[in-house]
Image (cartoon, helix red, strand yellow):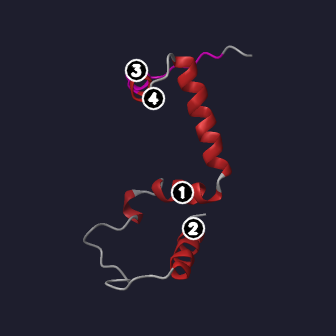
């Protein structure tokens, strides 16, 4: 095991400890790092993470007209749309 010293805003740590139900900061950090590592291994989660990390200007607003207005998409159409969008943001 290695000792690490990092500065993290106490209010962030305190809030996360309360929300997660862990007993201390060490357990919180370990769980958070394991969770992050698991997400990075999951290809679908990577696409979701990349989508949510886009600048606001690249996201559609509620007022943006959709190319799919009123039309239900098949699973195949949705997969193609996701692959297309993921390719745009690599």
Q: CA distance from mark 3 to mark 2?
A: 35 Å
The residue sitting at 30% across, 66% down in the picture is 61
Q: Distance between the Cα atoms at labels 2 and 4? A: 31 Å
In the image, 88 versus 27, the foreground residue is: 27
Give the CA separation, mark 2 to mark 1.
Answer: 8 Å
Start-end of magenta stretch: 4-15
Disc 3 or 2, which lies upstream in sequence?
Answer: 3
Front tag of 3 and 4: 4
Q: Quadrant of residue 36?
A: top right
Residue 86: which numbered mark, if any?
2
What is the distance, in whole Å, between disc 3 and disc 4 at their CAs? 10 Å
Q: Residue at x 59, y 55 (%)?
A: 46
Q: Is residue 34 above or below residue 60?
A: above
* Quadrant (top left, top right, bottom left, bottom right) of the C terminus: bottom right
> Mark 1 — residue?
50
How packed is label 4: few (under 14 Cα within 10 Å), some, or many (20 or more)? few
Q: Nearer the viewer, mark 2 or mark 4?
A: 4
Q: Earlier in the sequence, mark 2 or mark 4?
A: 4
Q: For marks 4 and 1, give the one nearer the viewer.
A: 4
Label 4: state its secondary structure: helix
Q: Is residue 90 above or below residue 36?
A: below
Mark 3 — residue? 14
C-alpha span from label 4 to label 1: 24 Å
Q: Are marks 2 and 1 in contact (CB under 8 Å)?
A: yes
Residue drawn 61% across the image and 33% down it: 33
> Which residue is the site of mark 4?
20
**Residue 23 location (% of width, % of height):** 50, 17
């Amino acid at each position: 095991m290695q000792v690490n010293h990092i500065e993290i805003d106490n209010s962030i740590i305190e809030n996360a400890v309360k929300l997660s139900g862990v007993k201390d900061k060490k357990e919180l950090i370990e769980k958070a790092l394991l969770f992050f590592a698991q997400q990075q291994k999951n290809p679908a989660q990577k696409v979701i993470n990349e989508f949510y990390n886009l600048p606001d200007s690249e996201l559609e607003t509620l007022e943006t007209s959709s190319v799919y207005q009123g039309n239900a998409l098949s699973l195949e159409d949705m997969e193609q749309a996701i692959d297309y969008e993921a390719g745009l943001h690599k």
